[in-house]
Amino acid sequence: MHPIVKLIAQRLALGLLLLFAASILIFVGTSILPGDVAQSILGQSATPDALANLRRELGMHAPAMTRYFAWLGGVLQGDLGTALTNGQDIATSIGRRLGNTLFLAFWAAVISVPLAIFLGLLAVRYRDRGPDKLISAVTLASISIPEFLIGYLLIYFVAVQ
């Protein structure tokens, strides 16, 4: 097998294993939290009958392992479930937003990859001198700022001003 194909196969397998492990950790974490989804949806004034009916409707009467593997089977078949907030299909909601996400990712790559290559070559050309130090400092500062703060600043300067 070609080394590149082997590397890609290993990375894909590790990625799938990581997704599986993360799904287990999130499921276990949400299962051991106090209270449950039915109580959160119906609130403190819910009657025991209403809680029991909602728990049965959500499938919470089944053991945790059964619920997890039922969810995993649905995900593998493309059924991500229904959002509890608005009752819409999650896969449909993601699909509607996927086009915008891919558009943004494409343009981010078109801008950032050539810029990164150019700045990297410039930093190497002037190694340990002013341009290298400036590029390194600006890069470190920009990746250290949280994205939401940059978003707020862009909203302020682009939309408000």
Image (cartoon, helix red, strand yellow):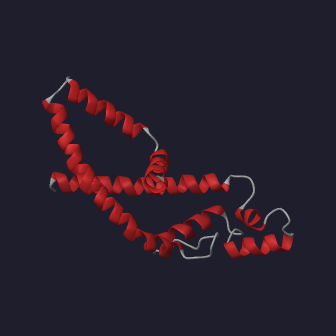
Outermost residue, top direction?
128
Quadrant of the rendered image containing residue 105:
bottom left
Q: Is residue 31 left or right of residue 9?
A: right
- Say left or right for 51 vs 88: right
Q: Is residue 73 above or below residue 32?
A: below
Name the spot of residue 98 as percent of width and height, x first. 40, 69
Is 123 rendered above or below residue 80?
A: above
Residue occupying the point 74% across, 53% down: 34
Viewer-closest of 105 and 79: 105
Nearer to the camera, 74 or 64: 74
Question: Front-most of 53 and 72?
Answer: 53
Count of numbered labels shown in the rendering: 0
Residue 66 spot, x, y in % from top left: 61, 67
Residue 132 appears at what percent x and percent y? 22, 29
Q: Taking 113 as reference, is 140 left or right? A: right
Name which quarter of the figure residue 36 lies in.
bottom right
Q: Residue at x 37, y 39 (%)?
A: 142
Identified at 38% across, 34% down, the residue is 141
Along the viewing direction, whichever of 23 and 149 lies nearer the viewer? 149
